[in-house]
Amino acid sequence: MEIRVIERVLKVNDELALEVRNRLREAGITAINIISAPGSGKTALIERAIPALRDKLRLGVIEGDPDTTRDAERVAALGAPVTQINTSGGCHLEANLVLRALDALPLDELDLIIIENVGNMVCPVNFDLGEMWRAAVVSVPEGHDKPAKYANLFRKTDLVVLNKTDLLPYVDFDMAVFEADLAQLNPGVELLRTSCRSGDGMAAWTAWLERVCGESPARAPG
Amino acid sequence: MEIRVIERVLKVNDELALEVRNRLREAGITAINIISAPGSGKTALIERAIPALRDKLRLGVIEGDPDTTRDAERVAALGAPVTQINTSGGCHLEANLVLRALDALPLDELDLIIIENVGNMVCPVNFDLGEMWRAAVVSVPEGHDKPAKYANLFRKTDLVVLNKTDLLPYVDFDMAVFEADLAQLNPGVELLRTSCRSGDGMAAWTAWLERVCGESPARAPG
């Protein structure tokens, strides 16, 4: 009984995700869904991308959080169009929320929309938001065992960003285990090593954003 | 329609949580439900408690993860009875899973069971597992804004552990904002500052575990 209802909800979400995707395509916009645990540095990565891409791409942001508008305020301070979705305690974004967020963004003036999902490594994975690309972020202090433990996220992503590499000297992080687990879960997936604090890897991160704006995604939606 | 079904599922969970709680009380066991984001150091806190409490309390552990038995292996290596629950990608523990995990633990030989929930700051909050006490862990690199953003978790907890304090010199963490947000969400909640790496706060952590074994919880279940 419960399972049937869950299937219905997901079906409705997939239909709305298709609506999002069609609307983005008509407007010539590429959308990226960023998923990570709370505090992995999703907002910091977006903050770094805004000035770096200013002369190349017109970037808009959709911020998802259970509560507060703190992330949207950080992004707005950098001059990018932004919409905050508060899920009122909800654990993931859904396509219907993104569809409404699009109404609040100047689609005619954008090339790229970054959707920052709610901080959660599990639930967001199951909800297609209508994005073209998905990026998973994991930060060094979270530990090298995260891909193995939260396998679904790392299987269903186009990019893995290992963030906060400036903390590598201060924690026990086994890079070989991390890379081996990742290679098993998602062979050939692109991996960027970044630190928003030191600036390491920022050029590769913004180059990836630029590149996917001109490419068709290889992975099926969702 | 969906809402009705969700209520039904939660009701069933609450009934099973009561069953867990009754079984634990009959066995004279105190149970603690630890909730945090992935990689905040829940397992490390448990690893530190096992040898520290060895001569004082008989400690058992229930490990929750979407995948792998890595955490249970870490705990078992220290000689504590442990059961691993794999949720097969599920985002939180539920009372029915804990009820089955109890069957695999030597209840006659335990005073305290620590239940390590799935790494997730949102979903586990809504599921009573039959525990007597709840502890929320957040680690320094996750950022000072986590209580405000993930308010439900910090409202509904008996203890907050701020872990990985050894990383304070290397990240931007505003302790005043963190404490002010926490005080607003959960006035008077106990806050421990810990580092499993340096050992700071470990005595206070194990003292808290010892203390709650002899006390009745102030907060209503769930």
Image (tube, coloured by chain):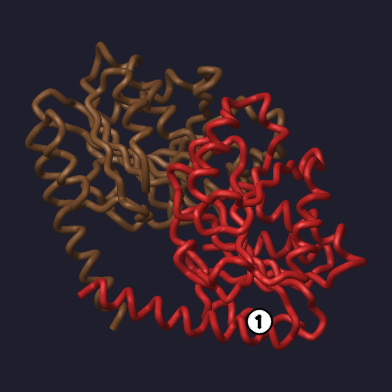
Chain colours: A red, B brown
Chain letter of the residue beneath label 1 in the structure image: A
Which image quarter: residue A167? top right
Q: How many marks?
A: 1
Which image quarter: residue B63? top left
Q: Residues within 10 Å of mark 1 (few under 14, many from 20)?
A: some
| Residue B149 can be seen, yes or no | yes
Q: Is residue B22 left or right of residue A22?
A: left
Q: Residue at x 78, y 66 (%)?
A: A76
- Quadrant location of the N terminus of chain B? bottom left
The answer to which of A182 and B185 lies nearer the viewer is: A182
Q: Residue furthest right?
A: A55
Question: Picture coordinates of residue A40 (x, y %)?
Answer: 61, 47
Q: Residue at x 66, y 54 (%)?
A: A42
| Residue A63 can be seen, yes or no | no
Question: Picture coordinates of residue A181 (x, y %)?
Answer: 50, 40
- The residue wearing badge 1 is A102
Which image quarter: residue B64? top left
Q: Residue at x 18, y 41 (%)?
A: B101
Question: Picture coordinates of residue A192 (x, y %)?
Answer: 70, 46
Label 1 sits on what residue type? Answer: Leu
Q: Residue at x 33, y 26 (%)?
A: B75
Q: Is residue B120 left or right of residue B50?
A: right
Question: Picture coordinates of residue A23 (x, y %)?
Answer: 65, 86
Q: Kindly state the secondary structure of the residue where label 1 is placed.
A: helix
| B12 lies above or below A132 | above
| A100 lies above or below B137 | below
